[in-house]
Amino acid sequence: MAADKVLLIDVYALVYRAFFALPPLTTSSGTAVNAAYGFQRMLHRMLVEEKPSHVIACFDAGIPAERFAAVPEYKANRPEMPDDLRPQFHIVRRILDGYGIPVVEVENEEADDCIATLVTQASARRLDTTVVSGDLDLLQLVDRHCTVVVTRRGISEMTRYDIEAVKARFGLAPEQLPDYRGLKGDPSDNLPGVPGIGEKTAAKLIAQFGSLDALLANLDAVKPARIAELLRTHADKARACRDVSSAKRDLPIEARWDAWRYHEPGKERLAELFRELEFRSLLSTVATPAFSGIAGSDDGAVEPESVTFEMGSYRVVDQVATIARALDDAAKAPRVAFVLIPALSSWRLDSPQALAISWRSREGVIAPAQMLAGEARLRDQFSRLLAAAPPRKIVFDAKNFSGWLHAHHFELGELTLDPMLAAGICDPARGEPTLADALVGTPGEGVPVPDGGGAGSTLFQPGQNVEPDWAAPADALMRAADQALETVRQAGMEKVLLEIEQPLAPLLARMEAVGFRLDEGELARIRSSLETAIAQTTADIYRLAGEEFNLNSPKALGSILFEKLGLPSGAKKKKSGYATGAEVLAPLAAEHEIAAKLLQYREVSKLKSTYVDALPAAVDPNTHRLHTTLHQLGAATGRLSSSDPNLQNIPVRSEVGRAIRRAFLPATPGNVLMAADYSQIELRIFAHMSQDENFIQAFQRGDDIHAFTARAVFGIPEGETISGEMRRRAKAVNFGILYGISDFGLSQSAGMTRPEAKQFIAEYFERFPKIKGYIDGVLEKARRDGFVTTLFGRRRYLPDLRSHIYPMRAAAERMAINAPAQGSAADLIKLAMVKVGKLFAASGVRAQLVLQVHDELIFDVPPDELESVRAQAKEAMETAMTLAVPLAVDFKAGPTWAAAEAMV
């Protein structure tokens, strides 16, 4: 008989994860069920894998008052629960009831504290516990009796943390994590931490001094002095964030271990529930043995359905001669696959342990990466193999692989296949798939990979000695290549993969490596001015409210605005209070000064915390530069995204946003930053797609497109003046049509009445009938096919076009109208980047592309190359795609990002 084991479920965390990980799913009656379905899948998997003797589900039932007292802004930035998610918690409770799983919740307490209390009680009885959550905060509970399983991406990837895994990730013991969080804060919970101290510095300080209290008691020993001063100034804030982050272990919960013993679920009741929810794929599981033997017994245990990968014959090659022979064999093969081991694990990319290489199915080797980079003979062989033509290389996550190659002065030649990019463009909603996900449905499916989901699936861990089986992922890529390429071909996206995404990957790696220098003195001046502005705005709000209150508490704010001051709330008060988001305050701002001041306070506070305080902490101590991470599949439209930090999201229209851009300097002192910005690119693509002669001719003539539209709609002859209001309305509808704007939406954006907006849209379509015909045609085809495509063939799947829920269906229709133009613009700028990279390489210029922000490219350019680089960028960008209208690019240059001025 297996030993007792407790499984504790953080319900809210898993349900939220499922809701945002899965596409919208509805029953035939229109009931949203995606979160409930995903939760059931995660629950069933944990039951099968853990075989617990006891299972308890813990719910949030409020937030303790003492946490608000310690940090008033705690969780104040949490958005309202989506309307489609709220009703699904009732379904989740029914699922738990179907499995016979008890629910524990304590009024005004968080699920984390319920779980911590139960972990403590279980440990006292020497019961082993597994906690499953989406929240890393619970890693503080890990000890010799407790492990924590955390969802990583989607609903299938989970990472198990024991004491060693926590230390490997953070360099700290589990019990030190609240102290660590006290220093670094947590944006997701709106915990400020100590401004200017990021994750690396926080971990280093706690590891060095042992605890936050010991650190604050020995500030004279802290180096550099700047960090010590920050800690002195914000010591109370750090302690408060630590206290709020510490899970409570003494809630009044009476554990009923005998009553809570888990038993096999009632199949008939579950089958009835699954039929009602139309979980057809789950009905078959109720009738299978999968429900047997999962309640703490080894008898009759059935593992979850999975594909078993047949391992091949692999070798470790760790001598120069044997590595050289392996590289020679690979060079003679039709194809060769590479997997850089840290790309799949938690190791840093700049210190890989090994490179997996396979050139024949069921064969492969593992070679020490440092030998490939350090031994002259091997460097030469490896370089030739990487550059070999025709392209025959298979690499998973070519951008990260290229980053390692670039750091060691290697170059990755043309690729046959990056399975991550291939899978990502075929299923754009899931972002950047893991290797395990990318191989699903191919002959490489089921290969053991790190953190790939499921007990025993991890092939290797940090610090482990090199093993031959580490070559299995490269072998899996070899087996999967033909089928992965065929899937891309069948979807009509071969050009997207081979001409856009794969050639772009090495360029993105170089862009990340260049980065920016940061003028920290300028940021300090901005910080001082923002602190003054925050203090003044806060005082103004208190004056207008007639009292002081917690500005970051939606509950307190709602009470002031809608009860004391009597402002129109626009909605009934909910259990959690009034809605106080920007969508509520913005319409009030024109008539109520306090609403305008609150919006100003939020904007300035966010800019300070998100950029002015955070950017200096993100500077790499080795390069002394700021490096972002660019995500090739960061958006379903194909656009790039940026993170850690997000440099695409710095506001450009506000004075403060422009001021922050003054702190961005070229990576190379003395260079200038040059910006190349496509002019009205989505409108030009829309004109080409609709084939409206009027728009096409206007762009060909170089007309002001919004003035042209205003003349057409208002019937103003050439030569007569167009008023600013007419042009503004025309601009609103030009861009609004791209997004399927309604008369209500146009009335809000253009400041007209709804009947006026309706008439304006009708006249617009009357003047430009081909645009109306194009939109109708796109929607008809999208409803039939289930997807739309860009000019280059990239697909955007829109399952909600068939939704029974009107808001979801209407949103999908707006996406169907916009996605072809927006996605084509994303394709265009990626093509331009690839072309720029080739031109720069051919001409030998020292200039480097450093960032892409929507329709704009940012270059780091030596002053003596400015005109040459401008000419090359202009050629690349304006000829990247042939349209019925000309492409136009505007150029600016200057010593900082903000100081760039128009180039004549």
Image: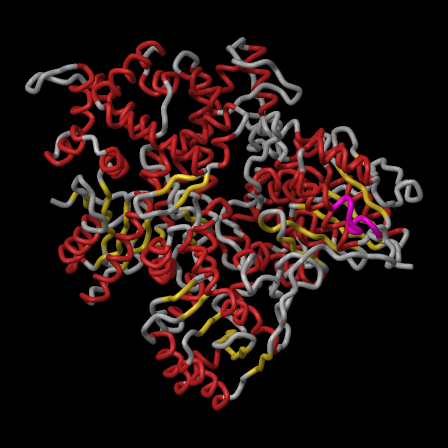
Towards the viewer: 504 or 59: 504
For the N terminus, the image quarter is bottom right
Residue 535 shows in the view: no
- Where in the figure is residue 501, as x and y percent of width and height? 37, 56
Towards the viewer: 230 or 877: 877
Rendered image quadrant of residue 837: bottom left
Q: Residue at x 42, y 79 (%)?
A: 333
Q: Which residues are magenta?
A: 285-292
Magenta region, main secondary structure: helix
- Where in the figure is residue 528, as x and y percent of width and height? 41, 38
Q: Residue at x 48, y 40 (%)?
A: 609
**Relative to 523, is 576 above or below?**
above
Towards the viewer: 651 or 161: 161
Rendered image quadrant of residue 786: top left
- Where in the figure is residue 358, as x and y percent of width and height? 50, 75
Residue 560 shows in the view: yes
Residue at the limit of the structure toward the left, as seen here: 719
**Relative to 41, is 346 above or below?**
below
Q: Residue at x 14, y 58 (%)?
A: 868
- Where in the figure is residue 198, as x and y percent of width and height? 52, 51
Does the magenta segment cover residue 865?
Answer: no
For the C terminus, the image quarter is top left
Q: Residue at x 79, y 59 (%)?
A: 144
Does the magenta segment cover residue 287?
Answer: yes
